[in-house]
Every structure is written in structure tokens, then in C-alpha cells.
Amino acid sequence: FCHSTFADASSQRVLKLEEHIRVSRELGASFKKVTFAGGEPTLYSGLRQLAEAAKSGGTTTNLVTNASRLADPTGKYRKLQSLAHCIDWLTISADAGTEEAHRRLGRCEANGRTLLQRIKE
């Protein structure tokens, strides 16, 4: 459900998890608030470690998500529970309020299922 194509990602250097953690720790020690956003941060397997590193610096942490991955297929909120100790604010981002608008914007799966449908399930 992310509108980013990341077409240029293969040509750019990607940080290793340890480097991401170091940067998050430095941000957490230097700023009052650190926000994890851009694309869909819950897709990144190291998100919890980054949030913990930022939080260890005493900062307020925020997660901006479309909420499509907060619950697993069984309806359990394990992802959200695993982040609860290190995320202070949770911001839900939605591009539109109707399924039709989501489809028009291309915010749907190949089968046409939209984020709104997924959240309702």
C-alpha cells in the first residue's frame, strides 16, 4: 500500500542494521522527538531495534504507519505489542477515505483489495 517505487534504491548504499541502530541512538540523544516514517516502516525487520535505540537516548518516538501490518493474519496485534515499550506515539496515515479513491490512487493490491478492506478484515 506504499506509493513509493524505490526505483533508485538499488543504486544507493543501504545501511546495515548496526549502522541504522547507531544513527537512531544518536538521533534519540540529540532530538526531542524521532519519527519513523517513509514507505511503510513496519515492513523493516529492524524497526523495533531502531525504536529501542532512539528511545534509549531519552527521546519521544513516533511511528507513522498505514496500519496494514500492525495485526497479523490471525487478528493478533503482535507487531504493535512488540513496539509498545519503545513507541510513544502512533500515527495512522491514510491517503483517502474510500475504497474507490484508494484504487484510483493505486493504493491497492494486485487483486484490487484496498487498505481499507484489509483494516476492516
Image: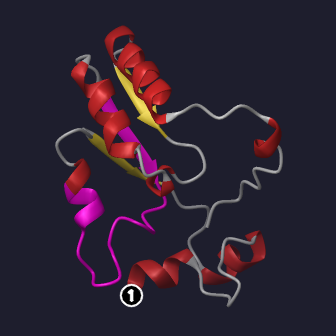
* Amino acid residing under circle 1: Glu
* Magenta residue span: 60-81
Q: Position of residue 12 (x, y in %)?
A: 77, 34
Please name the residue shown 49% across and 25% down the image: 19
Q: Is residue 90 left or right of residue 69?
A: left
Please name the residue shown 35% across and 65% down the image: 70
Say how the picture is coloured. secondary structure
Please name the residue shown 24% across and 68% down the image: 77
- The residue positioned farthest toward the bottom in the image shown: 111
How many discs mark residues in the rendered view? 1
- Between residue 74 and residue 21, name the one nearer to us: 21
In terms of image quadrants, where is residue 8? top right
In terms of image quadrants, where is residue 50? top left
Asked if residue 25 is positioned above or below residue 36 in the image, the reply reads above
- Residue 62 lies in the magenta-colored region: yes
- The residue positioned farthest toward the top in the image shown: 30
Residue position marked by numbered label 1 in the rendering: 121
- Between residue 98 and residue 79, name the one nearer to us: 79
Task: Classify 10 Å Cα crowding around label 1: few (below 14), some (14-19), many (20 and above).
Answer: few
In terms of image quadrants, where is residue 38? top right
Q: Is residue 100 left or right of residue 58?
A: right
Asked if residue 82 is positioned above or below residue 36 in the image, the reply reads below
Q: Position of residue 46 (x, y in %)?
A: 41, 44
Q: Position of residue 17 (x, y in %)?
A: 46, 35
**Which element type, helix, strand or loop, lies under badge 1?**
loop
Please name the residue shown 65% across and 80% down the image: 109
